[in-house]
Image (cartoon, rainbow, N blue to C red):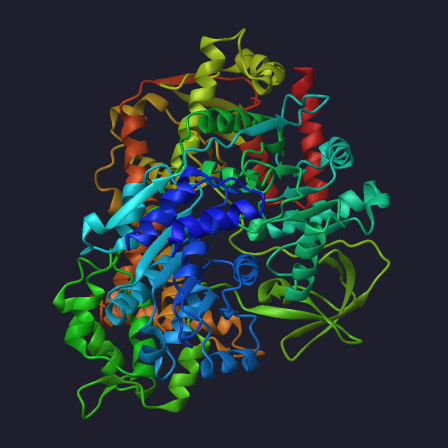
């Protein structure tokens, strides 16, 4: 009888492929019953490296579930299902391969419940739904292999925590199960392997395999033909649309990535306006468009019936579009791993080169293109930071087990502690959680609606109330967003979803663009936005909360490195830096281009007041925190009235009187000590924690989001969670969910550790102070971002034209 490795190799050869070394290694290690993490470039054959042994281990004569493949995206799950089913059919294995995700019809789910498939492709949420079903232990005790796909994407989120908890339970049901993770973009595998394996895994049973394949990524920057010396972010790169259309014409199939759904909508419309010949050949793909349309787009690009697709991160991961020739990236992706993931959509075959065109939304973003190229050369990729002690996810998980077969407190505590997330869970915290589930915690003990779990006669913790059980199953998951309202035609037909806050701003007759269609708002009926097609010009585009990205720490380091390169090798520069020479020359006229070890501060006066611009180059979110912190500490020295602005390169303090820059260092205002207290006073972290708590309240089921097609309005969710937040803040300040909200705000939203490192760096750096007479090219984008908050797009454009003209004359 042939081994798994021999059978897999022969089948791959029959498909016309030569097996890679990493594939053979995976087949051998799975055959030896080892667990591990596979790291390989996108399009190198990762699916068959672990998918073939999963299929070959399964026994078609046993009608039980034997293999589970977990993916983060529904589109990717369908892709994996097709790949595994093709291999199953072509090898004649006779297995039943099934797919279960949020789009799977109830009829199909019931069929799977009665007649279990041998192989199941699913998502983290659907896996937990399996654990919430009666009799799950009998259905899952025969598992031989579990694969967690795109582990780099999952491990840095609460969905990763869901997987950690699910794996701890599946390992207790089937001790012999093999667990493997797949990642395309991890640099350091030790932490990823540790989170996947759990805190008590036998290290000799876990290995990592890194594919010895070099994936070449060619970056071509779209350089403006006329280089504006005072760039700004407002035009989203649209001024380069002619050059983008040339790129689309040059290639058979293109994916055009934007960073936000709003940007996606705008670019799609602008391309069709400029090149109407693309009608029928170009489509749009983002998560708010209805599933059928997204599926149609995915299939159309596979069979090359589309020339281009304008998309967002909805197509970042794994979906196999082999025909795609090139990627167009609009604006900086703000992270190296995210860029590599998107680049991998092009040349999605072993050995092929990925071709990426970088389109800056303003000229200075060209520095990011050069920084990305440098990072890719030395494989400097960010590692995701895993969550720790997510009590909200643990509470939800306890409810999941309680609605199915119940659990014993002591046994589950020991099981949960085997995960990386909860390895430091104390027995006191565990008892608090159980008390919370039974009594609703100290301050809520008089309200029956918060009492979910009871201890039955068999000493099992269970949820007996059928209504509570149904509500729990409807709310399983950790992805929390504003309430989404369906957009439907008056004549019938579902288009997609917009967030409630956008819909609430619409007036009857308003024209807006959505899903590539120009629509007129008719009315809001039963939480549905009723529309009809319109031939008028749209004045609005939906936007979604939380869409703006910020530099990662690694991206920031490479940006500073590229600026250093401009100083050290002025005659041997990247094409982007050469193109930026007019901007650099103008910058040097008024100020400096800082070296990597220098901290630039610009000071100038206009009729608006005294401008103080600081350049840490650490990303928008870090700059927002530092700007507020610094303004607060200055106000402790003397009263100050100021306005703050920030972007990825720096921040501005606009004050009514000048600030003596040297005093900031002399008075230790960059000191990282007392940062916690000062941030609370400066940034209103209580308000930020309140917003974080809203998500925690939803995940832990403190608040109910509503039934299908009857979701609770966002403002009601917000008010309910805020009321609970205030109750805990005033009457139960040691409430674990309240403390978790404060901790997550600091650790994940404000990146407390990184913030401290940046403050220490600035404190130990001599400032390079430039006293300017006018705004500089570096400061101009920051100033215009501040004006954006006060002016409409048309007024802003007019204002900026006047400002630019004045600066150019100087």
- On the rendered image, what quadrant is the C terminus found in? top right
Q: Could you tell me residue 367's position as x and y percent?
A: 53, 25
Q: Nearest the camera: 674 or 123?
A: 123
- Percent from the top left, x then y, of residue 172? 24, 69
Asked if residue 775 lies left or right of residue 508, the reply is: left
Q: Is residue 424 left or right of residue 168?
A: left
Q: Quadrant of residue 519?
A: bottom right
Q: Where is residue 614 in the image (x, y as percent from the top left)?
A: 43, 28
- Residue sitting nearer the eye, 361 or 395: 395
Question: Which residue, as the protein is rendered here, is positioned at the far front?
Answer: 1
Q: Is residue 477 visible?
A: no
Q: Is residue 328 left or right of residue 374?
A: right
Q: Which residue is drawn at 67% across and 65% down?
A: 292
Instruction: Examine the rendered structure and indicate whether residue 518 appears above or below residue 20.
Output: below
Q: Quadrant of residue 704?
A: bottom left
Please, which residue is most extreme toward the top here?
571
Query: Is residue 289 among the parts visible in the rendering?
Result: yes
């Amino acid at each position: 009888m042939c081994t798994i490795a021999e059978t897999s190799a022969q089948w791959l050869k029959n498909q016309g492929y030569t097996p890679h070394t990493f594939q053979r290694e995976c087949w051998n290690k799975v055959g030896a019953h080892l667990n591990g993490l596979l790291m390989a470039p996108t399009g190198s054959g990762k699916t068959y490296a672990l998918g073939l042994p999963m299929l070959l281990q399964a026994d078609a004569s046993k009608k039980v579930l034997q293999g589970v493949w977990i993916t983060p995206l529904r589109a990717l799950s369908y892709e994996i299902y097709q790949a595994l089913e093709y291999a199953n059919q072509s090898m004649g294995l006779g297995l039943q391969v099934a797919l279960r995700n949020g789009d799977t019809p109830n009829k199909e789910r019931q069929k799977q419940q009665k007649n279990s498939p041998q192989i199941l492709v699913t998502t983290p949420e659907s896996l937990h739904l399996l654990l919430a079903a009666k009799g799950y232990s009998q259905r899952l005790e025969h598992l031989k292999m579990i694969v967690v796909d795109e582990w780099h994407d999952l491990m840095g989120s609460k969905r990763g925590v869901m997987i950690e908890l699910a794996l701890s339970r599946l390992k207790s049901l089937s001790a012999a199960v093999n667990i493997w993770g797949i990642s395309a973009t991890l640099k350091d595998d030790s932490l990823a392997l540790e989170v996947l394996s759990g805190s008590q895994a036998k290290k000799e049973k876990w290995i990592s395999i890194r594919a010895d394949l070099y994936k070449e990524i060619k970056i071509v920057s779209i350089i403006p033909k006329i280089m504006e010396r005072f760039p700004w972010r407002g035009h989203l790169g649209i001024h380069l649309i002619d050059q983008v259309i040339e790129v689309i014409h040059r290639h058979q199939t293109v994916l055009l990535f934007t960073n936000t759904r709003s940007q996606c909508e705008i670019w799609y419309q602008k391309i069709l306006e400029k090149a109407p010949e693309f009608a029928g050949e170009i489509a749009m793909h983002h998560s708010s468009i209805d599933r059928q349309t997204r599926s149609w787009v995915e299939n159309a690009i596979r069979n090359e019936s589309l020339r281009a697709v304008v998309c967002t991160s909805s197509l970042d991961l794994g979906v196999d579009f082999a025909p795609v020739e090139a990627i167009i990236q609009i604006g900086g992706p703000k992270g190296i791993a995210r860029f590599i993931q998107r680049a991998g959509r092009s040349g999605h075959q072993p050995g092929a080169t990925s071709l990426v065109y970088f389109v800056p939304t303003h000229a200075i973003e060209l520095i990011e293109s050069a920084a990305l190229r440098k990072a890719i050369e030395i494989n400097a990729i960010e590692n995701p930071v895993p969550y720790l002690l997510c009590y909200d996810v643990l509470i939800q998980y306890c409810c999941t087990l309680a609605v199915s077969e119940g659990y014993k407190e002591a046994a589950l505590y020991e099981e949960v502690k085997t995960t990386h997330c909860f390895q430091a869970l104390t027995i006191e915290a565990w008892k608090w959680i159980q008390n919370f589930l039974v009594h609703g915690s100290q301050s809520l003990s008089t309200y029956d609606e918060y009492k979910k779990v009871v201890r039955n006669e068999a000493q099992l913790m269970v949820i007996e109330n059928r209504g509570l059980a149904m509500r729990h199953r409807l709310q399983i998951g950790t992805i929390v967003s504003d309430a989404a309202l369906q957009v439907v035609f008056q004549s019938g037909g579902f288009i997609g979803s917009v967030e409630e806050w956008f819909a609430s701003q619409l007036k009857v007759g308003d024209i807006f663009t959505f899903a590539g269609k120009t629509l007129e708002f008719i009315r809001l009926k039963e939480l549905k936005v009723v529309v009809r097609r319109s031939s008028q010009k749209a004045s609005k585009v939906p936007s979604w909360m939380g869409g703006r990205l910020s530099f990662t720490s690694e991206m920031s380091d490479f940006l500073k490195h590229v600026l250093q390169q401009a100083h050290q090798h002025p005659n041997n520069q990247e094409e982007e830096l050469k193109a930026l020479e007019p901007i650099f020359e103008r910058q040097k006229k008024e100020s400096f281009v800082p070296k990597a070890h220098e901290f630039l501060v610009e000071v100038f006066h206009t009729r608006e007041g005294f401008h103080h611009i600081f350049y840490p180059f650490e990303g928008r979110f870090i700059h927002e925190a530092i700007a507020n912190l610094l303004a607060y500490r200055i106000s402790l020295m003397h009263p100050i009235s100021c306005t703050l602005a920030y972007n990825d390169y720096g921040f501005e303090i606009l004050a009514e009187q000048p600030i003596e820059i040297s005093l900031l260092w002399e008075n230790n205002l960059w000191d990282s000590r007392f940062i916690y207290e000062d941030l609370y006073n400066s940034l209103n972290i209580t308000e930020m924690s309140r917003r974080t708590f809203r998500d925690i309240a939803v995940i832990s089921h403190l608040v109910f989001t509503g039934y299908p097609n009857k979701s609770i309005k966002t403002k009601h969710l917000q008010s309910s969670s805020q009321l609970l937040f205030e109750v805990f803040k005033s009457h139960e300040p040691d409430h674990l969910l309240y403390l978790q909200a404060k901790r997550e705000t600091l650790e994940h939203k404000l990146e407390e550790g990184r913030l401290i490192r940046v403050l220490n760096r600035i404190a130990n750096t001599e400032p390079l102070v430039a006293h300017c007479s006018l705004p500089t090219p570096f400061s101009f984008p920051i100033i215009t971002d501040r004006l954006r908050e006060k002016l409409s797009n048309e007024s802003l454009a007019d204002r900026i034209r006047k400002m630019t003209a004045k600066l150019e004359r100087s």
